[in-house]
Amino acid sequence: MHIYDHDDLQRYLQEHLEDFGPLKSVEKFSDGQSNPTYLLSSGASKYVLRAKPPGKLLKSAHAVDREFRVMQALAGTNVPVPKMLHLSGDESPMGTQFFVMEYLDGRIFWDPALPELALHDRAAIYDAMNATLAALHSVDPANIELNDYGKPGNYFERQVSRWGQQYKAAETQTLDDADYVMDWLTANMPDDDGASAIVHGDYRIDNMIYAKDNPQILALLDWELSTLGHPLADLAYQCMHWRLPNAAEFKGLAGMDRASIGLPTEEEYVTRYCDRRGTQVPDNWNFYLVFSYFRFLAIVQGVLKRARDGNASNPKNNDMIAGFVALLARDARKLT
């Protein structure tokens, strides 16, 4: 949790944000394990502040400056993003770097089964996600000055190495399944096909704000893991999440008959995306799913490490998180 002086923060925001009045309140959003996010109220106006967490952090993690840059660059494209208002330096009233963006009033769906919607309204929500992902991957990074936003070529090879190192750096228990999956990914690495796009890195339904009365996506949020990479990484990551259970802390679609609840199957969703992009469904689809499982378990393992070190944005039961890491490793291995 950030420790800050209310008056210092108010003065700073008034100096750097146009027409910012007295700072009425600062409320931390309860959800999210990574970069702490706060709702700022000033008179009748609302803003969102997103900051690096305090404490010792893994190298390259929590890059709020990258989030700010990519959302600012995407303004004016077909990808919906909130308006960026200010990026601080490392020295700030919050004690860490932060950015401020506009507040958007809309709907966030926390459960991909969409139980709060009528059955006939659900497919349009998924189609909007599908269209937005295809739109993101169709943006030419060079056209919005993001051609240096990531390294070119060998995306999956570099990512397996990166997340393998981060997993090992945050390891709190030895998992044979996780070690097996790391080795399998290396042994089954596909040839680089040259595909490259801006990838979101955490593309899932609860990172989107929808309009209150229609399926339009107002904003795609949480760009902390974005980079230049292979577009199938985003697609597989989203599909991987839907393979998770829908119970307790897990919000997936495992065991559900998607057609009977008005949702597309994984095959239908992937095919629709590929149709929009003019590409083919890959023959080695399981590689991309296994990669997504491993990448996610490395991220969750980092959350567990921070929770045990006292630096997590939203500390929860450590045993539950450790069990989730083991589940991801086990399910990934089943796909090999």
Image (cartoon, rainbow, N blue to C red):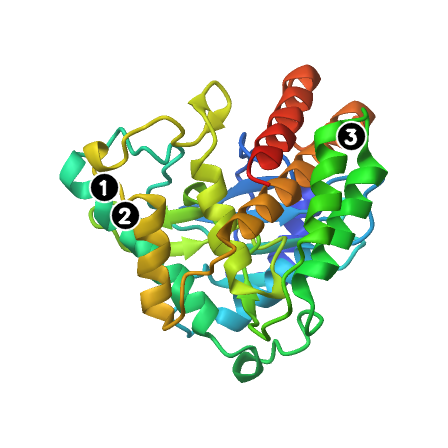
* Residues tagged 1 and 2 counted as in contact (Cβ below 8 A): yes
Q: What number is the disc on residue 305?
A: 3
Q: In whole angstroms, how far apart are the C-alphas of marks 2 and 3? A: 35 Å
Which of the 4 image quadrants contains residue 318?
A: top right
Q: In whole angstroms, how far apart are the C-alphas of marks 1 and 3? A: 37 Å
Q: What number is the disc on residue 159?
A: none
- Please, what is the three-letter code of the amino acid marked with disc 1? Arg
Q: Is mark 1 on a helix, strand or loop?
A: helix
Front residue of this view, candidates 143 and 150: 150
Q: Is mark 2 on a helix, strand or loop?
A: helix
Check the picture and name the quadrant holding the N terminus: top right
Is residue 32 visible to the viewer in this orientation of the structure? yes
Residue that label 2 marks: 125
For disc 1, the neighbor class at 10 Å (few under 14, some 14 to 19, many from 20) is: many
Q: Position of residue 22 (x, y in %)?
A: 55, 46
Q: In whole angstroms, how far apart are the C-alphas of marks 1 and 2? A: 5 Å
Does residue 41 appear to the left or right of 54 in the view shown? Answer: left
Front residue of this view, candidates 104 and 328: 328
For disc 3, the neighbor class at 10 Å (few under 14, some 14 to 19, many from 20) is: many
Does residue 195 appear to the left or right of 92 in the view shown? Answer: left
